[in-house]
Image: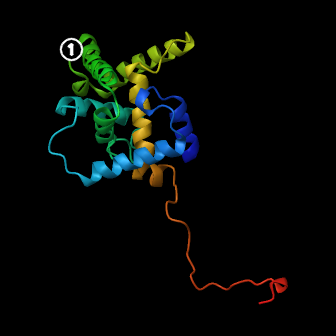
């Protein structure tokens, strides 16, 4: 998948009111700007997510984009990107919905396995995420609004955060940010008709 295709699919699946209507290029620019701010500021405190919520978001994101031959969502610091989006781009309603969905992940884990999501085993975590994904699929098949479902937004934010990060751009998509070789003293080709 090319950068433009990735961001077009993100743009078409967007469920965040404050980020709708942007072109793929603008979404890329916003994502890069957020990543640069996330790296440049050492934050001692969280913007929206507390430590447990941050750990849960990190774990879910790593299941969505795991480390393989390229780094995963954890290495791309997608959790910090999501925290910035929650703080600066989500409105109060969107933020509250997301946090309720995140809390529901722990509720499901406690009901099924007797422990919070981050302490569940990897197979148990994957079972919960598959259940959430099945709910999103059922909403889509019923032609209902699946974009407001927590897991739909979590996947979107993970993809957006990952593919606008340096790791996602350079190592995964292999985008050459800097153009190829620059030869400042290369030969000038002249056309005989130009007369110089």
Residue 131 in percent (x, y) is at 41, 16
Mark 1 Cα shell of 10 Å, populated few (<14), some (14-19), many (≥20): few
In the image: residue 156, left or right of residue 192: left
Return the x and y of residue 160 as percentages of the image width and height.
Answer: 43, 39
In which quarter of the view is residue 182 placed?
bottom right
Identify which residue is drawn at 85% across, 84% down: 193
Quadrant of image for the N terminus? top right
Q: Name the residue under label 1.
A: 114
186 up-or-down from 133: above or below: below
Quadrant where the C terminus lies? bottom right
Foreground: 191 or 64?
Answer: 191
- Tell me where residue 114 sits by quadrant: top left
Residue 1 in view of the camera: no
Is 128 or 44 nearer to us in this picture?
A: 44
What is the residue that sits farthest to the front in this orientation?
195
Q: In which quarter of the image is residue 157?
A: top left
- Residue extending farthest left: 44
Q: In this view, does 78 lie to the left or right of 106?
A: right
- How many marks the image carries: the answer is 1
In the picture as drawn, the residue positioned furthest to the right comes out as: 193
- Is residue 50 visible in the rendered image? The answer is yes
Q: In this picture, is 133 found above or below 161?
A: above
Residue 7's place in the image compared with 146, above or below, is below
Instruction: Label 1, secondary structure: give it.
Output: loop
Which colour assignment does the render follow? Answer: rainbow
Q: Position of residue 15 (x, y in %)?
A: 45, 25
Q: In this view, does 78 lie to the left or right of 182?
A: left
Which residue is depicted at the point 54% across and 40% down?
23
Rendered position, 70 above or below 154: below
> Who's the residue at 43% across and 27% down the image?
17
Q: In this view, does 25 lie to the left or right of 152?
A: right
């Amino acid at each position: 998948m090319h950068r433009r295709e990735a961001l077009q699919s993100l743009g078409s699946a967007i469920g965040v009111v404050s980020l709708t209507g942007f072109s793929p290029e603008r979404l890329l620019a916003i994502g890069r700007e957020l990543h640069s701010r996330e790296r440049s500021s050492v934050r001692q405190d969280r913007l929206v997510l507390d430590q447990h919520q941050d750990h849960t978001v990190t774990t879910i994101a790593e299941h969505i984009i795991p480390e393989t031959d390229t780094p995963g969502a954890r290495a791309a610091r997608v959790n910090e990107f999501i925290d910035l989006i929650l703080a600066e781009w989500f409105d109060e309603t969107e933020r509250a919905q997301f946090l309720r969905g995140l809390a529901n992940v722990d509720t499901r884990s406690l009901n099924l396995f007797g422990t919070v999501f981050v302490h569940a085993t990897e197979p148990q975590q994957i079972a919960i995420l598959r259940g959430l994904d099945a709910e999103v699929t059922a909403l889509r098949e019923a032609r209902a609004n699946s974009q407001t479902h927590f897991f739909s937004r979590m996947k979107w934010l993970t993809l957006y955060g990952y593919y606008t990060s340096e790791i996602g751009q350079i190592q995964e998509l292999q985008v050459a940010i800097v153009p190829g070789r620059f030869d400042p003293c290369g030969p000038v080709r002249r056309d005989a008709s130009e007369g110089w």
